[in-house]
Image: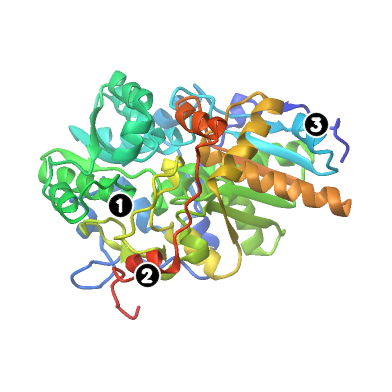
C-alpha cells in the first residue's frame, strides 16, 4: 500500500456509525473469570450487584454469550454529535521518522470531554436515567472519565458526584472546572467525607491517592445514598462493550479503504481504550480469521501487566467492591504521582487479563520521560497535543516504526489516540524544564502491594 492510496483523514459516513456494540467475550474460548463476592467467594449474581450498578449494566456485565448488543436510539443520537471519529493517516510522522511503515491513529479527542470516555459515559447515564435514578457517583484519575460522565449526566438531568484522585485534582485544576461547569460535585480523594477516605488517610498520611482509593469512596457514597448508583469508566466488561465502537469504526474504515493492520497498539490502565480499539480485530483473531500483533503499553511506574500477578484481588483500596481475577499489583499499591493519571490503577480488565494470559496480547512498560519525548515529537509533526495516557501508545508506535526502518519492512501500525493533553500542560512544563523524573518501583515496593492480594487459591 503506497502512502497516497488513502485519504489523510478517513471519516465514515454518519449512517455507517455502528448500531450495535460488539461483545468480544462471545468469541473467547476461555471466558474472563467472574466477579466474586468477597465474603462467600462465589460468583456474583444479578441481585448481588443491584446495590452498586444499574440493572441493565449488570445484565451487560454478566452476558458472555451475546456477540452484538443494540445501541439504544437515545445513545446513538448522542454519538452522532461527535462520531464517527477520524482514523488519521500519520503521514507527517512517517516522513519525520523516515520509516517505510504506514502509521494510522484513531483519534477519540474530538469532543468536549477530550477523550474516548464519553462513549461509555453516555450509555451508563442513559441506563441510570431509564431506571429512574436521581444521580450517580464515580471516580476519576486524570479527569477524562469524570468530565465525560459530568457531560452525560448533564444531558440526562442526573446529579453527578466525582471523587478525583488527589494528585490529579491538584495537577489538573482546569479539568476539575470543566466537570463543575457541567454540574458535577468534585471531591479530592482520599477525602475526609467518607468512612473509607478517613481510614485511608489515617493509614497513608499525606497520600496522593489512587484510582483504587477513589473507587472505594464513590462506591460507599452510592450504596449509602438513596436513588444513586456507582458508574465506572474502565475495567468492567460493560465498559469494554461500550468502547467497542472505537474498534468497530476502525475496522469499518480499514475494510473500506483496504488497510490491513499488522500491529495494533493501545495504552493500558484499566483497559477501556485498549479493549475498545482491539475488540473486532481480536474477534477475528479468536475465530482464526486473521492475525494481528496486539500490544498493550503501560507506565513503568504502574506495571500491572508486565510485573503484576494474575489473581483474584479487590478492585478498590477500601475493599468494598467485588473481587476480580486480573493482573494486579495489589489493592494496597499506590503508584507514584506520574502524570498519566488515567493509567494509575493497580489492576487490569478481567477480559484483557484473560486474553493476555492466553497469549493473544503482549505488554510493555515505558518510562514517563520517554513517553513525553514521543508526545512532543508527535505534536510537532501531527499538530495534536496528545494526552499523557495516549502518548504511551505513541511511544510504542514510534518504536515499532523505527524497527521497520532498520529492517525495511513495510508494516501497517494502528494506535489509539484516546485524548488531548491541553489540561496536562503542567506535565509538559516539567518535561520541557528538565525536571520530570522517572520512578520505577523496586521489587521490594511491589512486594508490599502483593502482600495485600488475598490468598484464595482461585
Q: Which mark is residue 212?
A: 1
Is residue 252 toward the left or the right of residue 2 in the image? left
Dot 3 lies on which element?
loop
Quick check: 353 left or right of 43? right
For the residues labelled 3 and 2, the Cα–Cα distance comes to: 49 Å
Whether residue 249 is visible: no
Where is residue 330, by image quadrant?
bottom left
Q: Residue at x 59, y 58 (%)?
A: 364
From the viewer's side, name the closer residue of 14 and 5.
5
Of residues 230 and 254, the one drawn nearer to the viewer in this rendering: 230
- Choose the circle earlier in sequence order: 2 or 1: 1
Outermost residue toward the top in this view: 181
Q: Residue at x 58, y 27 (%)?
A: 385
Q: Which element type, helix, strand or loop, lies under badge 1?
A: helix
Residue 375 on image: x %, y %: 61, 35
Quadrant in which the N terminus is drawn? top right
Q: How crowded is mark 2: few (under 14 residues within 10 Å), some or many (20 or more)?
A: some
Residue named by callout 3: 6
Residue 160 position, x and y percent, is: 24, 31
Residue 447, disc: 2
Residue 285, percent from left and from top: 65, 60
Q: Which residue lies furthest to the bottom in this view?
A: 457
Lateral position of residue 238 relative to residue 135, left or right: right
Instruction: For the C terminus, give its image quadrant.
Output: bottom left
* Mark 2 → mark 1, Cα distance in angstroms: 18 Å
Numbered disc in front, either 2 or 1? 2
Amino acid at each position: 500500500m503506497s502512502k497516497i492510496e488513502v485519504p489523510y483523514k478517513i471519516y465514515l459516513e454518519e449512517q455507517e456509525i455502528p448500531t450495535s456494540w460488539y461483545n468480544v467475550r462471545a468469541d473467547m474460548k476461555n471466558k474472563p473469570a467472574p466477579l466474586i463476592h468477597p465474603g462467600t467467594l462465589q460468583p456474583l449474581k444479578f441481585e448481588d450487584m443491584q446495590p452498586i450498578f444499574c440493572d441493565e449494566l449488570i445484565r451487560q456485565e454478566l452476558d458472555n454469550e451475546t456477540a452484538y448488543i443494540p445501541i439504544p436510539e437515545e445513545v446513538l443520537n448522542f454519538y452522532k454529535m461527535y462520531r464517527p471519529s477520524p482514523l488519521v493517516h500519520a503521514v507527517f510522522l512517517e516522513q519525520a521518522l523516515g520509516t517505510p511503515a504506514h502509521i494510522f491513529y484513531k483519534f477519540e479527542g474530538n469532543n468536549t470531554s477530550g477523550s474516548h470516555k464519553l462513549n461509555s459515559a453516555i450509555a451508563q447515564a442513559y441506563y441510570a436515567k431509564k431506571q429512574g435514578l436521581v444521580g450517580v457517583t464515580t471516580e476519576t484519575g486524570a479527569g477524562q472519565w469524570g468530565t465525560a460522565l459530568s457531560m452525560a449526566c448533564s444531558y440526562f438531568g442526573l446529579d453527578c458526584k466525582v471523587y478525583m484522585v488527589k494528585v490529579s485534582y491538584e495537577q489538573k485544576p482546569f479539568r476539575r472546572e470543566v466537570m463543575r461547569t457541567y454540574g458535577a460535585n468534585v471531591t479530592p480523594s482520599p477525602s475526609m467525607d467518607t468512612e473509607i477516605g478517613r481510614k485511608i488517610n489515617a493509614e497513608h498520611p499525606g497520600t496522593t491517592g489512587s484510582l483504587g482509593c477513589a473507587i472505594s469512596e464513590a462506591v460507599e457514597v452510592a450504596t449509602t445514598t438513596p436513588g444513586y448508583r456507582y458508574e465506572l469508566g474502565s475495567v468492567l466488561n460493560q465498559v469494554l462493550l461500550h468502547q467497542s465502537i472505537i474498534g468497530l469504526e476502525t475496522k469499518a474504515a480499514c475494510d473500506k479503504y483496504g488497510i490491513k493492520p499488522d500491529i495494533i497498539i493501545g495504552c493500558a490502565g484499566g483497559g477501556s481504550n485498549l479493549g475498545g480499539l482491539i475488540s473486532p480485530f481480536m474477534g477475528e483473531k479468536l475465530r482464526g480469521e486473521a492475525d494481528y500483533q496486539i500490544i498493550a503499553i503501560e507506565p513503568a511506574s504502574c506495571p500491572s501487566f508486565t510485573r503484576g500477578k494474575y489473581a483474584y484481588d479487590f478492585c478498590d483500596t477500601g475493599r468494598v467492591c467485588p473481587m476480580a481475577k486480573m493482573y494486579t499489583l495489589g489493592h494496597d499499591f499506590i503508584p507514584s504521582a506520574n502524570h498519566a493519571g488515567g493509567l494509575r490503577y493497580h489492576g487490569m480488565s478481567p477480559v484483557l487479563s484473560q486474553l493476555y494470559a492466553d497469549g493473544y496480547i503482549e505488554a510493555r512498560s515505558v518510562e514517563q520521560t520517554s513517553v513525553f519525548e514521543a508526545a512532543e515529537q508527535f505534536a510537532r509533526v501531527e499538530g495534536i497535543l496528545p494526552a499523557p495516557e495516549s502518548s504511551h501508545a505513541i511511544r510504542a508506535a514510534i518504536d515499532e516504526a523505527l524497527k521497520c526502518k532498520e529492517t525495511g519492512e513495510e508494516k501497517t501500525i494502528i494506535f489509539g489516540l484516546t485524548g488531548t493533553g491541553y489540561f496536562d500542560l503542567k506535565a509538559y512544563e516539567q518535561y520541557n524544564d528538565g525536571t520530570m523524573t522517572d520512578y520505577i518501583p523496586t521489587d521490594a515496593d511491589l512486594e508490599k502491594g502483593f502482600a495485600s492480594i488475598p490468598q484464595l487459591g482461585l
